[in-house]
Amino acid sequence: MTNWTATLANLVAHSLPNDVAIASAKKGLLDYLASSLTANQTETGTLLMRWFDEEGGHAEVPLIGMHKNASARQAALYNGYLGHALDLDDVHTDVRGHPSTVILPALLSVASTGSFSGRRFLEAYAIGVEVMARLGLTIGAQHYTRGWHNTATLGGIAAACACSYLQRFSAEKIELAIGLAATQSSGMRNQFGTEVKPLHAGFAAEQGYVASKLTGLGLIGSRRTLDGENGFLSLYGDGTDYADALTSDWGDSWKISKPGLWFKLYSFCSAAFHAADACHELLSQDTFILEDIQKIEVIYPPKGDAALIHTHPQTGDEGRFSVEYIVALFLTNRTASLSDFTHEAIPSSIRQLMNKVTRQYDATIKPSPHAVPKGRFTIVRVHLENGNILESRVDAPLGSTDKPLSMDQLEQKLDDSCSEEQAVQIKQAVHGLDKAATLSELIEAVR
């Protein structure tokens, strides 16, 4: 019987991501920093910093954009939370979650307290994404639909592997780090739409950092945590033997590049991006006024809306995970801004249109081979009072791997998130990172 923990650890220890993966990693790093800097000054972030001040510790790792340091463990928690605070950070379809906001904060905490090259840092990031994506494929779709949040449950293991690679741990040590991270795995989707949801990313980043730190200091635990009846894959999986997906064809291509990261321009769940793009298309098809709308149907494949847990959201925060809100918002305002996703109650004008939205499921509709995620689509069908029906179908929304954002668009996202001076410093540091002997320029820029 295959020892999957040992097999994965050995692959992580002896991997060498190629130049294509490194180029993708630079894009992911830029996007993560843009998402984090956009989220500065959140209420939960202020709460965390107050806790860190009370707790104390050796302040040696920057809290992104805050001109303030914290301990390495605290910074992993804070920087992980911050990247996911607005749900503006990247997505990977194999993960069914958000890899960069877990892996990069853990790596920054390790890198800020040691001496590593920029190339090694980017390689470690690519390997972390590889592990998290393969875990997502291995664990099966029911893990998510049962209510687990993959960002949280898979992220700690991926971050531990990335940190272990950065520090050149042996395969045997990586087995131990995987085990310590796996035993901490948790995170429930019923927290979507609350302040706890982005903390899932912070907790996972902290777990990954702590797992590598304690393993490096000599802590000994199980070296077969993924395996067997009581192992991670059995406990969290759906009973199907997908374990070969964990390691097969490792290194033939890298998940950070193929299928790649999905970068977001809007601050809501990526599962609603198809519907947002469909609304844009409908508005360009015909001129109609909201009062003419009789009803709106949003059609998915079965379980295609699992992440959108709120059908009757009360606030903009809950609306991040509600297709009813996103459709009503885009048909009313033609776009979305950060101010639409706060603790404030949803305006009555949008709520009235939300009440006309219903979800439908159709297993007979054939998914497109170019669909992102695979097998998914969203159809928005608007019925007007005069009997006319307007319809738009989206299989791959803007920003997804089939319709990726350009480097210019990613850099504009960064430009919009911080001062011109800081944006220039970050872009210079990131673009030259694979040639940098240390990460000092990057670490200074993110302050």
Image: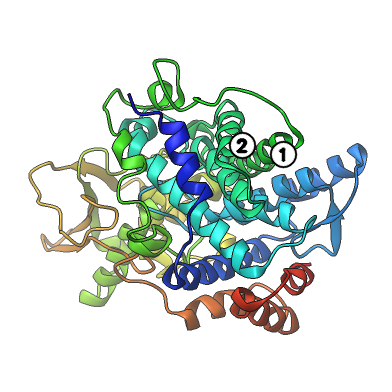
Local SS, label 2: helix
Which residue position holds label 2? 173
Side (left or right) of 127 relative to 405: right
* Residue 397 x, y percent position in the rendering: 32, 64
Give residue 384's quadrant in the image: bottom left
* Residue 252 x, y percent position in the rendering: 32, 59
Q: The C terminus appears in which quarter of the rendering?
A: bottom right
Where 250 sits versus 4, above or below? below
Where 304 sits versus 420, above or below? above
Colouring style? rainbow
**Can residue 308 be seen here?**
no
Give residue 140's quadrant in the image: top left
Side (left or right) of 108 relative to 173: right
Q: Are marks 2 and 1 in contact (CB under 8 Å)?
A: yes
Q: Residue at x 31, y 58 (%)?
A: 275
Q: Of residues 80 and 154, which is closer to you in this image?
A: 154
Q: Of residues 41 and 244, which is closer to you in this image?
A: 244
Q: Please tell me the numbered disc located at residue 216.
A: 1
